[in-house]
Image (tube, rainbow, N blue to C red):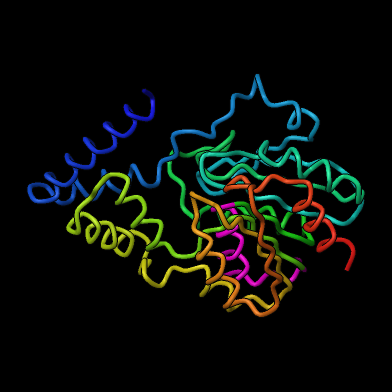
Amino acid sequence: MQKLLTFLISKTLGLYINILSYIYPKKASWLAYKFFSHPRDGRLIKESLPDVLKEADAEMITHNDFLFQIYTWKGNDTKVLLMHGWESNASRWELLIGHLKKSGTTIIAIDAPAHGLSSGSEFSMPRYAEFVNVAVQKFKPDYLVGHSLGGATALYFQSHYQNDYIKKLVTLGAPCDLNTLLKNYAGILSLNSNVFQLLEKHFFEHYKIKTHEFSGSVFASKIKIEGLIAHDVHDTVVSFKEAEKIARAWPDAQFVTTKGLGHSMHGDALYKSVYEFLFEK
């Protein structure tokens, strides 16, 4: 029943935006972008944090008009920064943190814009990368690990900031092309081509982003450090083909395929591979 209700709401919203695009295109563009960029899940309440986050040292950092949350599990001088994905938060790393602690490393996790305890209502990769850059300058991590849009943002970050502190980068279930994300979103709401063009125009006018050029394969081609790309062949959220495009563009990256982990990419065997990539080579 819940799935049917969600389906009907999505299609009704899409129909409304489609009709609006011919009458009030600016409002249609704003609505389409709002529902694409505003997460509806992933928030946390400070008074009732998951246990794994209660174990960490928590710090709120100010950046321009935004606040973002950082969690640190203190260890030795080696540091790894973890970046979660869409409608998630730093607590999603609980299982991986258990593996990373075996190395004695210091573990740092960030709440993305509009997620966890971080401020804002809108998510964008460039803004997420800004947050990450502030954290990298402060903590100087050796490694980055990102899941889903966190992995895509890690690629964007390293290609644009070219940070010398980062020695290795891991992506788990990361999407590649912004246009693919937009097409999937348009499919869910059954948005017409007119609305899709309005969305492309919105990205360019507000962020100077040409959606067909905003691609993980482009970002990966500029990265000079070692990487590990992991993706599940049965991922129903982000197509396996997205990982293949990133892998083709990043010659210094290993490509690990999994079966049965889905989009969450939680698995002891995979996390063992991540551990070995980071600490045993």
Left or right of 115: which side holds 10? left
How many labels, in total? Answer: 0
**Magenta stretch contains residue 95:** no
Residue at x 52% of width, y 68% of height: 216
Determine whether 94 is above or below 267 in the image.
Answer: above
- The x and y percentages for residue 208 are 36, 66
Determine whether 157 is above or below 106 in the image.
Answer: below
The boundaries of the magenta stretch are 148-167
- The x and y percentages for residue 153 are 56, 58
Q: Seen from this angle, which residue lies furthest left?
A: 23
Quadrant for residue 194, please give it. bottom left
Quadrant for residue 4, please give it. top left
Residue at x 51% of width, y 64% of height: 242
Q: Main secondary structure of the magenta part?
A: helix
**Magenta stretch contains residue 160:** yes
Question: Is the N terminus in the top left, top right, bottom left or bottom right quadrant?
Answer: top left
- The x and y percentages for residue 264 are 61, 45
